[in-house]
Amino acid sequence: AGMVLAYLAIGWRAVSGRHAVRWLGLLGLFAVLPKFWMSQGGPIYYDETAHYALLQAVISGHKLFQYTSLLPIGTYYPGMESAAAAIHWLTGLSAWDSALTLIAVVHCLIPVQIYYIARALPVTQRLAALAGLVYAVNPSFIYDDVQFAYESVAILLMLTVVRLSVEALAAERSGGRTWRQTLSTSLLIAVMSFGCVVTHHLTSLDGTVLLLVAALVLKPMTGFADRKGGVRRLFVRWTPVLTLAACLVLWIAFVAPGTVPYLFPNVSKPASELLS
């Protein structure tokens, strides 16, 4: 929180003005710098140590779905490692520098996606910028999502899917889109949904819940079936939810069946404690 307040002291007028997107992106970079200074030579936290081991195995073996005893379930979610390995092969950077580069780019884009989601709801530009700043204050963004860990990348992919979905719903309010544009957006949602699923299981599940809430709550949708809206409105409303859910279910069923026993204790125990 102190880092964000220091950043605001420098550039609040710019953040809330017409360069809000640029300054929110710089905020993401500003928040990631302390972690990078602490880990210039290699990973320092448990999760990123496991994922870095997977990345090294991918680079040396030239194939995905590598194994490490540090995080066995990570074998079946190689999205982040594949992106970092691509950076390594394309730029010649070391494996760890490639990992840091990927996380830096992702961390810069997360507040920007929050801004665009808020703009599509719709809210004013200043309130949208404030939404990005409020998100940047949460401890996960400052401490957890600066790690080279699969959640750090998957959150951006999930937020991108949510943004595309909310923007499509907003376009239905104005009636300014054609079927071709709607199908193009749906294809992009499908690609991003698949990327999210092959990167992190729990983030994909959270994204499905968010999309379901958006489909049920956001205007111009009224009622479950929304019969007055026509076929396209139903398509726009439910395609993102079904696409992400289908990708997750199919990936778990055919590629990563171990995800269910891995996640079940982490979900059932907190749920039982809340109920009790």
Image: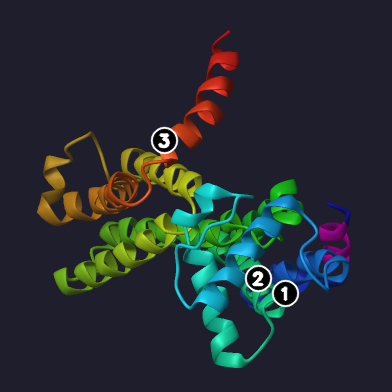
Quadrant of the frame with the C terminus: top right
Q: Helix, strand or loop at disc 3?
A: helix
Q: Position of residue 87 (x, y in %)?
A: 57, 83
Stretch of the chain drawn in magenta:
3-9
Q: Which residue is tagged 3?
A: 260
Residue occupied by mark 2: 108
Residue at figure coordinates x 24%, y 72% from the top left = 184
Q: Amino acid at mark 3?
A: Val
Tell me which numbered mark, 2 or 1, is placed earlier along the sequence.
1
Looking at the image, is mark 3 or mark 1 nearer the viewer?
Answer: 3
22 up-or-down from 270: above or below: below
Q: Label 2 neighbourhood size at 10 Å, few (<14), some (14-19), many (20+)?
A: many
The residues tagged by marks 2 and 3 sit, at their Cα atoms, a distance apart of 32 Å
Q: Nearer the viewer, mark 2 or mark 3?
A: 3
> Which residue is the site of mark 1?
26
Look at label 2 and name its amino acid.
Cys
Query: Mark 3 and 1 residues: CB-CB less than 8 Å, in contact?
Result: no
Tag 1's secondary structure?
helix
The first of marks 2 and 3 along the sequence is 2
Please state the horizontal and vertical placement of residue 31, each as a whole percent of the image: 78, 64
